[in-house]
Image: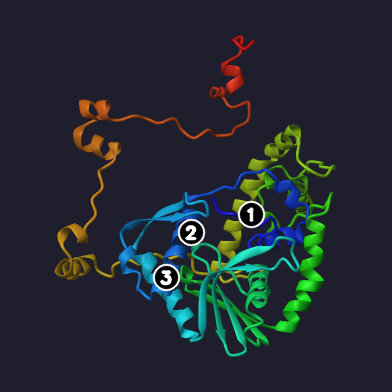
Amino acid sequence: MTVHAKLSASGSTRWMNCPGSVAAEEGKPDSSSKYAELGTVLHDVAEHMLVSDTDGSEFIGKNHVVFGDDGEPYAEAEVEQNHVERLRDYVDYVKSLKGHTLVEQRVDFSDWVPEGFGTADAVVMVGNTLNVIDLKTGQGVRVDADMNSQLMLYALGSLVKFGLLFDFDRINMVIHQPFLDHVSEFEISVDDLLMWAEQKVAPAAELALSEGAPRVAGKGQCKWCKAKSRCREYASQAMKVVSNDFDGFESVEIKEAGDLTDAEVAAILEKASMVTSLLKTIEETAVSEIKDGGHVPGFKLVPGRSIRKWRDDAEAETAIRKKLKVADAYTKKLISPAQAEKKLGKAHPLIQDLTVKPEGKPTLVPETDKREALIFTTAEDDFAGFESDAA
């Protein structure tokens, strides 16, 4: 597996703003997803493209595996043509800086954060300017470089690592999100970066590692926190916001610090449907208001994610067929049971013989719901009543 720092650069927004989150997350497993694995794979492909000076064509259509520090498979995903095309934008940007370039550099900022280290995707040294570039392959939220603590910690580590070889006075930090056509740059002087490290980072790190460090709820630090599902501060803030802003909403009283009890979780769930419905209604109202030419203070409508499509399918098919073989130009997918049923009829034996209906995902509902409750057992329940043969 890959080793992560306790006070990581990527988690700095969390631990710098909520010191108590470090202890709260202790022992909680890391979650993963196909998107996270794809991100790891694309970072590895981008590194290869920069180091080997290739256009990445050799990865297209292949399943790429990334191995961890222990030699075991760490992430795996298929690399598509669109992935490589977007990574070329990032690679071209890094190359355009025309300096001494190093990729996937492990940097150490433990002078300010005990055992603090991380990996900078690309470091480019041009004259007296140190460029630190962070590749982000997500397609959801745009990230800006302005006072970005993750990038600034990478910059600190890079300054420590290369500062004796080059006489830097400026640092240019870059967030490159090729899948969102977004490049954000932020420049800071070396003196200002070191002042930030001494005045902000070092005290925050010391507090985060101290016993009894306070938890502080907030939008930025709570978003990816592994402990938020049981965090009283997070729940309390959310309930107070709703109860303070809307008359007639009775807040759940949460007094103590630390983790929520089962009773408190149940009390919050009772309010969940109302809050969810309220937020959906308010959002729909705001969207409608702005579309009608109105204004909602602090909000605006922006274009959502858009996926490219052929301008004219028939024209594109004719052109592509001239360039590619049939096997490369088309994809095939078996029709679904529902589609087969429409063609063969509901009573056709093939439908009954070849289909299964998997158990649906467990859904949380009030006890008053008429559906029968699922029964879950533990290993201890399964072996209850058996006596051990051990002497």
Q: Is residue 242 visible?
A: no
Q: Which mark is residue 87?
A: 3
> Pointer 2 and pointer 1: residues touching (CB < 8 Å)?
no
What kind of residue is marked 3?
Leu
Tell me where residue 15 sits by quadrant: bottom right
Q: Quadrant of the C terminus?
A: top right
Q: Which residue is mark 1?
A: 224
What kind of residue is marked 2?
Thr
The location of residue 280, given as percent across then percent down, is 59, 52
Query: Who is closer to the viewer here, 274 or 372?
Result: 372
Say whether disc 2 or disc 1 marks the residue closer to the N-terminus: 2
The local secondary structure at tag 1 comes to loop
What kind of residue is marked 1?
Trp
- Give the residue drawn at x 23%, y 50%: 332
Q: Would residue 58 be found to the left or right of residue 222 on screen? A: left
Query: Who is closer to the viewer here, 354 or 13?
Result: 13
Q: CA distance from mark 2 to mark 3?
A: 13 Å
Q: Which residue is mark 2?
A: 40
Q: Would residue 71 be found to the left or right of residue 278 on screen? A: left
Task: From this view, report whether residue 196 is shown above or below residue 245.
Answer: below
